Amino acid sequence: MKFRTEVNIEESDRKIEIEDKIFSIGSCFASEMSELFHQGQLQTVNNPFGTLFNPFSINNSIKRLHDSEFYQEDELIAFNDEYISLDHHSSFDTRFIHKTLDKINKKIVEGNQFLQDSNWVIITYGTSFIYEFEPKKKLVANCHKIPQKFFEKRLLTHHELTDSIYDTILNLKDICKDDLQILFTVSPVRHTKDGMIENQLSKSKLITAIHEVISEIENCHYLPVYEILMDDLRDYRFYKEDMIHPNSQAVQYIFEKFGDAYFSAETKDFTKENFKINKALEHRSDDEKDPKYLEFRDKLNQRIDAQQKKTKHKIF
């Protein structure tokens, strides 16, 4: 007898190999997945613009990375004694205009260079809602806690959504490797501040637009991350205390399902051992010269050396 409806990720013919490069962009769920890639010692870059949620803003960031187009002083605004970019997450905000620009433009260089060698791109959309900054008549990625009276909120139209997704694919296919695989997901994090009905409408529009666009383009795939949390893990024990964000157990479950479908056998073994090594590296001793601790560290270094021989890129 079954007591849950399990959602599986269709096995991919193309597999992620140990030397492959994985670029991820989008909502905070994209960051959580990228962190697991990083812990598994795979080559990954995540969100050079910081956390982004809607397809329009994600497309804008991909365009800037594709063109390696630096930001200029007139593209920033001053608020709360800081210089900010409305295209970026608040983590880029600083009190000095040139420092903000330096942080932003360094990430553009890093993202552009990594994309040119990327084999995989994972895009996680969070919402169909967008805000327009009225003083500049500009659609923004982040409101930076600027008073709401300066913004107009609306849903992106179906045409705007499909155009953004299509344009993103074209720019990625142009800058990345010829055999690039693009994986689309919808974040399982519910935007409850929009309202529960509005959130469902927003997610539905994203899913519809993604499927419409990728049905016509090769090497583009949809990962049912949203469906796994909503239908497979239909229980609040898989959420954090806010009852909105998936907890570490849920993220790990989704990551394992993804790995089963997309990792080669070598990559599965490689990442599994690296997760164990990461856990072991957390162990500390009050006596760093304890013979038993020194023996433990020596064996751990041997395991790291054995893993390093399996790959060309530097690990740990």
Image: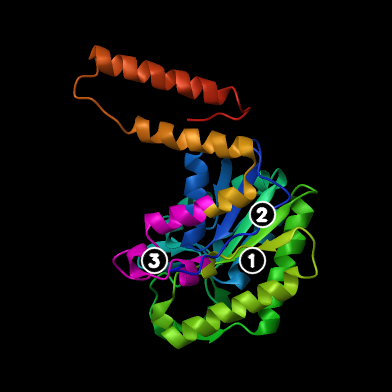
Q: Is residue 17 above or below residue 230?
A: above
From mark 1 to mark 3, how far is it between C-alphas? 26 Å
Q: Is residue 147 left or right of residue 227?
A: left
Q: Earlier in the sequence, mark 3 or mark 2?
A: 2
Q: Are marks 1 and 2 in contact (CB under 8 Å)?
A: no
> Where in the figure is residue 188, as x and y percent of width and height?
48, 68
User: Dot 1 corresponds to which residue?
Assistant: 60
Say if residue 231 shows up in the picture: yes
Q: Is residue 310 above or below residue 191?
A: above
Q: Nearer the viewer, residue 228 or 297?
A: 228
Mark 2 falls on what kind of element? loop
Name the quadrant containing residue 223.
Answer: bottom right
Residue 11 is labelled as: 2
Residue 293: image x %, image y %?
Answer: 27, 18
Q: Earlier in the sequence, mark 1 or mark 2?
A: 2
Instruction: Check disc 3 and report the residue beneath it.
Output: 245
Taking depth in this image into account, of 123 and 106 the one nearest to the observer is 123
Amino acid type of the residue that numbered disc 2 sits on in the rendered structure: Glu
Q: Position of residue 212 (x, y in %)?
A: 73, 76
